[in-house]
Image (cartoon, rainbow, N blue to C red):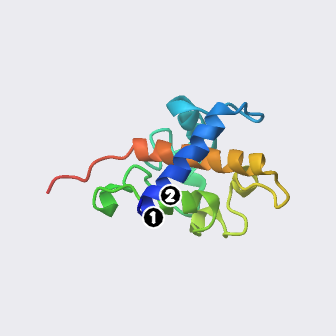
Amino acid sequence: MPSTNSTGALISLLVVVGLLAAPARAEPLGGRDASEHLYLTYCSACHGTDGKGGGALAKLLEVEPTDLTKFSAANGGIFPFRSVLRAIDGRMTVRAHGDAAMPVWGKVFAPPADASMREQLEAYGRMFLITFYLESIQEPAPSE
């Protein structure tokens, strides 16, 4: 019997694969290019094109943007996929993103209450792709 983590990972994979196979209406989804494109579109203005927090708007913000390349290093070498996804979708409040009811990109990523299953999957697919991209740019913990 698969573990809960394995089951969750399998469901996540199936959602993303399903989105990649379906024709997209808003913007194409698929592969690293799509995940990087989504990151650059929605995240880089604050977090920088390299994810280190030095985006064009960083100096104008009240709260310094997080270095998104350090999540794995801060978590014993394991990327905290679920926590990162929860920060993106608003379930985990990130002070700089606003409250959980309306994170900065809430209207872009969160499907409306009356959304069809397809619209819900597309919205979560975008969030998964950004999370996968963030996992791909993680830096190793510094040697002591």
Q: Are marks 2 and 1 in contact (CB under 8 Å)?
A: yes
Q: Residue at x 33, y 56 (%)?
A: 78
Q: Is 59 or 76 nearer to us in this picture?
A: 76
Q: Is residue 3 left or right of residue 44?
A: left
Judge the density around disc 2: few (<14), some (14-19), many (≥20) Cα neighbours within 10 Å: few
Q: Is 35 or 96 nearer to us in this picture?
A: 35
Judge the density around disc 1: few (<14), some (14-19), many (≥20) Cα neighbours within 10 Å: few
Q: Residue at x 49, y 60 (%)?
A: 82
Mark yes or no: residue 82 visible.
Answer: yes
What residue type is disc 2 on? Answer: Gly
Picture quarter with the N terminus: bottom left
Q: Is 117 or 64 nearer to us in this picture?
A: 117
| Vertical placement of residue 104 versus 95, above or below | above
What residue type is disc 1 on? Answer: Thr
Q: Residue at x 73, y 33 (%)?
A: 24
How far apart, in angstroms, are the residues tagged by discs 2 and 1? 6 Å
Q: Is residue 14 left or right of residue 138?
A: right
Which numbered dot is residue 19?
Answer: none
* Quadrant of res 73: bottom left
Question: Where's residue 21, x and y in %?
Answer: 64, 32
Q: Residue furthest toward the right?
A: 114
Mark 1 lies on a secondary structure that is helix
Which numbered dot is residue 4?
Answer: 1
| Vertical placement of residue 128 versus 90, above or below | above
Question: Where's residue 133, x and y in %?
Answer: 48, 42
Picture quarter with the C terminus: bottom left
Q: Is residue 116 left or right of residue 38?
A: right
Question: Where's residue 132, x and y in %?
Answer: 49, 45
Question: Where's residue 134, x and y in %?
Answer: 46, 46
Mark 2 lies on a secondary structure that is helix
Q: Residue furthest toward the front?
A: 1
For label 2, the residue is 8
